[in-house]
Image (spheres, rainbow, N blue to C red):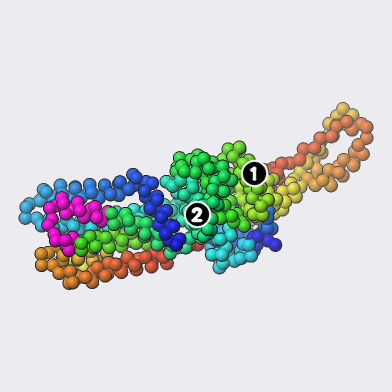
C-alpha cells in the first residue's frame, strides 16, 4: 500500500516549469527523503501534495485520497510543517499549537498539546511568545503544530535547514520515533547526508525525479576506491559501488601472502547524489 | 465553531500587541485633535458640525480598512494562511473569524472617536441622534473591515495592498459628500460616489445632525451600508483562494 502515488505531476508558473512530470510512489510507514539542491522544486512538490497548490497536470493520491477533491478528509489525516515556521509571533508556543490543532476537533486537544510540547522539549517555554524563542525553538513549535492531531502522514519541508547539529540530531531522533509509531514521513532536504537517515530517497533536479531508491542502492551507483598494498607498493583501483564489484576485484588478487594491506574508500552518499545531479545537468 | 477559534486567535493577537492596539485607538484620537486645531483657524461662520462627524467617520473607515487588509496579507506572507487551510480551516471560517475578531476593535474605535468629536467640538445632539451616529459609524467600520478583507484577497504581499489605499480612500473623500454636497458634482461623479460606503454613511449623518432631520428619510442608506458589508463578505469568501 502506498501512502503517496504521483503520476505525471507538472506545475507551471507562467513560463517557469517548477515540476516537469514527477512520478513517485511512497510506501506507507517509511521515512521518505526528497533530496535536491535549492530551486529543484522540493517546496512546490510538497505544497502540491498537501493541497496548497493546484497541479498544472498529473494525478496525486495521498493515503488513497484525491488530494484536491477529498481535501477536507485528507486534511484530517496529514500534518504539514512549512519551510519557514509560519507561526503567530505574538502568541505563545502553546497558543500556536492549540490553534493549529483546533480544526481537527479532538476532544482531548489540551492533552495532545501537552504531549507534543513534551515530545518537542518545549514544555518549559510553552507560555513564552514565539518572538522570544530561538530559530531552532520556532522550528520545534512549527513541528509540534504539524503533529498535534497525530496525523498518519507528515510532510516536513526542510525541517533541519539552518539548525545546529545537536538540534538536527534530536529532530531526526523524533522523526524515527514517529516512524516507529507508524507515521509516514515525507521530508525534503538539501542536505545530502540526511538522505542516509531515510528508508527511501528520491532525488529531485530541476523539477524531475532523477533517482528514487533506498539510500544503500543509491550509494551503489557511486565509485569505490580500492587500495591494495603488495610487495611494499600501493596499487589503486577505481571500481563500481556494488558489493559484487568489490568481491570481483578482491578475487583478482586471490589475496596471496604478498597482499599485505587492503583499504576501501567508498563514495559518500553526498558525492554520489552530487555526481548524479551533475550527470543530469551535463 | 472554527469561526470562533479564528476570532479568538485574532483577538488574542490584538491583545498581545499593545503597541498596535494603542496606535489604532490613539492614532484616530490624535488625528481628530489635529482636525480641531485646523477648524479653529477657520472663520466663526464655518459650519463645523457639517464636517466634524463625517470626518471622524472617514478616519474610522480608513483605519479599519487599512489595519484589516494588512493583517490578512501578513497572514499570507507569513505562511500562516496556507497553514490554516492545510490544517483544515475553511475560507468562510477564516473570513468570519476575522470579521468577529475585528468587530470589537471597530466598535471601540467608533465609540471612542465619536465621543471625542462630540466633546471636542462641543456638539449638542439628542440621545437618539447620538445613537444613530454611533450606529452609522459602527456599520461603516464593519463595512470597512469587510472591504479590507476583500481587497487583501487580491494581494500577495503588503506592498500590493498600498496601491489600493489611495484608490479607495481618496476618491471617497471627494465623491461621497464628505467635502462638498454630491448634488454639486457632475452627474457621472455623483453616481460614482455611490460605490463608496462613506457616501451612505455621510447621507445619514448629514440628515440626522440637522435639527429638522428625520431618520426615516434616509434609513435606506443604513440598509445599503449593512448590505455593503454582507456583499463584501460574500465576495471575499469567493475570492480568497484556498488552493493557489
**Residue at (66, 43) in percent of width and height:** A193
Which element is circle 2 on? helix
- Is A228 colored magenta in this rendering? no
What residue sits right under mark 2 in the picture?
A100
Q: Chain of mark 2?
A: A
> Is residue B62 in sight in this rendering?
no
* x 47%, y 63%: residue: B90
Mark 2 residue crowding within 10 angstroms, few (<14) / some (14–19) / many (20+): many
Mark 1 is surrounded, within 10 Å at the Cα level, by few (under 14), some (14 to 19) or many (20 or more) other residues, namely few
Question: Where does label 1 land, which residue?
Answer: A173
Judged from this view, the residue extending furthest toward the top is: A232
Instruction: From the top left corner, tell me how far across and down residue B145 is, in percent.
Output: 33, 59
Residue B38 versus residue B232 in the image, above or below:
above
Q: Secondary structure at mark 1?
A: helix
**Residue A281 image offset from top left, x and y in percent:** 65, 50
Closer to us: A82 or B211: B211
Magenta span dominant secondary structure: helix
Cβ–Cβ under 8 Å for marks 2 and 1 = no
Going from N to C along the chain, the mark reached first, 2 or 1, is 2
Region rendered in magenta:
B109-130
At which x and y percent is residue B73?
A: 41, 54
x 92%, y 31%: residue = A258
Amino acid at each position: 500500500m502506498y501512502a503517496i502515488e504521483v503520476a505525471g505531476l507538472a506545475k507551471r508558473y507562467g513560463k517557469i516549469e517548477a515540476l516537469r512530470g514527477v512520478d513517485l510512489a511512497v510506501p506507507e510507514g517509511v521515512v521518505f527523503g526528497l533530496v535536491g539542491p535549492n530551486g529543484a522544486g522540493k517546496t512546490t512538490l510538497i505544497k502540491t501534495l498537501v493541497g496548497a497548490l493546484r497541479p498544472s497536470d498529473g494525478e496525486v493520491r495521498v493515503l488513497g485520497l484525491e488530494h484536491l477533491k477529498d481535501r477536507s478528509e485528507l486534511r484530517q489525516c496529514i500534518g504539514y510543517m512549512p519551510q519557514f515556521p509560519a507561526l503567530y509571533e505574538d502568541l505563545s508556543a502553546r497558543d500556536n499549537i492549540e490553534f493549529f490543532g483546533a480544526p481537527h476537533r479532538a476532544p482531548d486537544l489540551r492533552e495532545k498539546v501537552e504531549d507534543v510540547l513534551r515530545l518537542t522539549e518545549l514544555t518549559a517555554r510553552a507560555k513564552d511568545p514565539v518572538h522570544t524563542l530561538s530559530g531552532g525553538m520556532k522550528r520545534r513549535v512549527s513541528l509540534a503544530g504539524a503533529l498535534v492531531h497525530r496525523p498518519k502522514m507528515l510532510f516536513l519541508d526542510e525541517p533541519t535547514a539552518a539548525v545546529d547539529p545537536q538540534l538536527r540530531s534530536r529532530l531526526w531522533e523524533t522523526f524515527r520515533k514517529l516512524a516507529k509509531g507508524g507515521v509516514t514521513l515525507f521530508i525534503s532536504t538539501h542536505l545530502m547526508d540526511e538522505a542516509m537517515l531515510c528508508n527511501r530517497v528520491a532525488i529531485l533536479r530541476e523539477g524531475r525525479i532523477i533517482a528514487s531508491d533506498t539510500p544503500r542502492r543509491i550509494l551503489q551507483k557511486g565509485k569505490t576506491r580500492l587500495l591494495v598494498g603488495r610487495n611494499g607498493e600501493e596499487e589503486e583501483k577505481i571500481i563500481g559501488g556494488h558489493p559484487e564489484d568489490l568481491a570481483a576485484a578482491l578475487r583478482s588478487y586471490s589475496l596471496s601472502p604478498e597482499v599485505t594491506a587492503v583499504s576501501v574508500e567508498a563514495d559518500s552518499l553526498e558525492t554520489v547524489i552530487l555526481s548524479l545531479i551533475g550527470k543530469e545537468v551535463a | 465553531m472554527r469561526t470562533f477559534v479564528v476570532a479568538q486567535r485574532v483577538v488574542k493577537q490584538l491583545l498581545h500587541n499593545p503597541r498596535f492596539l494603542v496606535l489604532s485607538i490613539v492614532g484616530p484620537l490624535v488625528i481628530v485633535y489635529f482636525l480641531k486645531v485646523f477648524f479653529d483657524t477657520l472663520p466663526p461662520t464655518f459650519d463645523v458640525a457639517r464636517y466634524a462627524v463625517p470626518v471622524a467617520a472617514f478616519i474610522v473607515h480608513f483605519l479599519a480598512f487599512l489595519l484589516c487588509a494588512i493583517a490578512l496579507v501578513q497572514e499570507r506572507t507569513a505562511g500562516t494562511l496556507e497553514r490554516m487551510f492545510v490544517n483544515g480551516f475553511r475560507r468562510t471560517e477564516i473570513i468570519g473569524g476575522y470579521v468577529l475578531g475585528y468587530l470589537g476593535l471597530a466598535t471601540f474605535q467608533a465609540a471612542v472617536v465619536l465621543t471625542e468629536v462630540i466633546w471636542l467640538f462641543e456638539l449638542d445632539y439628542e440621545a437618539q441622534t447620538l445613537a444613530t451616529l454611533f450606529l452609522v459609524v459602527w456599520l461603516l467600520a464593519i463595512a470597512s473591515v469587510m472591504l479590507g478583507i476583500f481587497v487583501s484577497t487580491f494581494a500577495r504581499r503588503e506592498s500590493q495592498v498600498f496601491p489600493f489605499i489611495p484608490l479607495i480612500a481618496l476618491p471617497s473623500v471627494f465623491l461621497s459628500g464628505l467635502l462638498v454636497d454630491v448634488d454639486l458634482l457632475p452627474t457621472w461623479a455623483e453616481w460614482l460616489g455611490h460605490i463608496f460606503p462613506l457616501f451612505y454613511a455621510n447621507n445619514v449623518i448629514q440628515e440626522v445632525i440637522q435639527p429638522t432631520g428625520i431618520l426615516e428619510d434616509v434609513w435606506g442608506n443604513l440598509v445599503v451600508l449593512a448590505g455593503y458589508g454582507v456583499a463584501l463578505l460574500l465576495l471575499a469568501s469567493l475570492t480568497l483562494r484556498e488552493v493557489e
